Image (cartoon, helix red, strand yellow):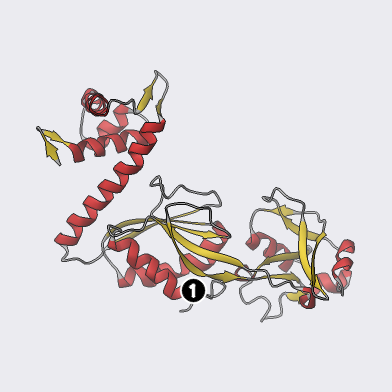
Amino acid sequence: MNAGGVDRARELEVFCAVAASGSFSAAGRSLALTPSAVSRTLDRVEARLGARLLLRTTRALTLTAEGKAYLSAARRILADLDEAEQAIADQGAPRGRIRVSAAVSHGRLCVVPLLGEFVRRYPNILVDINLSDGIVDVAAGQADVAVRAGPLADSALTARRLGENGRTIVASPDYLARWGTPRTPHDLHNHNCLNFNFRRIEPVWPFRENGTDYALKVRGAIEANSGETLGQLALDGVGIARVGNFSLGDAIAEGRLAPLLEAFNPGDKEVFHAVFVGGANMPARIRVFVDYLVERLNDSPAKPRR
């Protein structure tokens, strides 16, 4: 990657460091370069490309559209180069850092418990996991693998199915003793129904009755962005919740929560996928991690196989 005395790999490394740190000084410190050397490197890249990659002001550095595209490509190239060198150094054994993104509840309950065995299998892989309900841009290099729920948007990314998750309406025996047990969906109008707060639609729960599907608007005193939170509130006797089965754990089997209105459950499912940049040059560390998730989670995200 050295053409005419220019170290292209070093240029990519410098550009990625500037984009990550937001300043020439910080990038220089991380790479043992002076700020002026960093600036000259970026000037040289922009001159060769004939495009501005960064907008520079006294306050901040901002990536242009061309800069964002170049950054995505640069990260992939450096990752591939690192993977190739590491594979040769370790005779092909998967190694290196893998950045994983997952939603908070599903990640904590279903993905994190699997990591111990994975790193025992692959001691040369460092798993860098970030739990957040925000969506990361895998194509732009913000993560190597993202575990996502629900329908996937069309993209050039590769997705592998990790299983599906149903939903159950639950309440604690204490709540039901105090407020009564709903026998039909319409009885929920007299109950404190705990809801999610992140959907930009009306707070409705789906039901199926006599072969007909319909949605019922419900109300309650608390809303949250996590099924695990709603499940805990139901355990505390605060109200009735409709949450993913994976967030219920053993609470139903142990009698700490009671399933409600199962005769009216429409059986809707939420599918989970591992999303990543595929292709022939996919690093081995990503391939073995995705294979492992499929092995342990496929068709059973509610309770990972141990």
- Please tell me which residue lies in front, 113 or 148: 148
Quarter of the figure with residue 84: bottom left
Residue 86 at least partly seen? yes
Image spot of residue 205 (x, y percent): 76, 62
Image spot of residue 120 (x, y percent): 32, 71
Left or right: where does residue 95 sit relative to residue 85? right
Image spot of residue 18 (x, y percent): 32, 33
What quarter of the picture does the N terminus occupy? Answer: top left
Left or right: where does residue 131 sit relative to residue 236? left
Farthest residue toward the top?
A: 58
- Please tell me which residue lies in front, 194 or 45: 45
The residue shown at (24%, 28%) is 38
The residue shown at (34%, 39%) is 71
Residue 108 at least partly seen? no
Image spot of residue 157 (x, y percent): 42, 54
Residue occupied by mark 1 = 298
How many other residues sit within 10 Å of disc 1, few (<14), some (14-19) or many (≥20)? Answer: some
Circle 1: residue type: Asn
Q: Secondary structure at mark 1?
A: loop
The residue shown at (15%, 61%) is 88
Quarter of the figure with residue 91: bottom left
In the image, residue 293 above or below residue 58: below
Left or right: where does residue 204 sit relative to residue 288? right
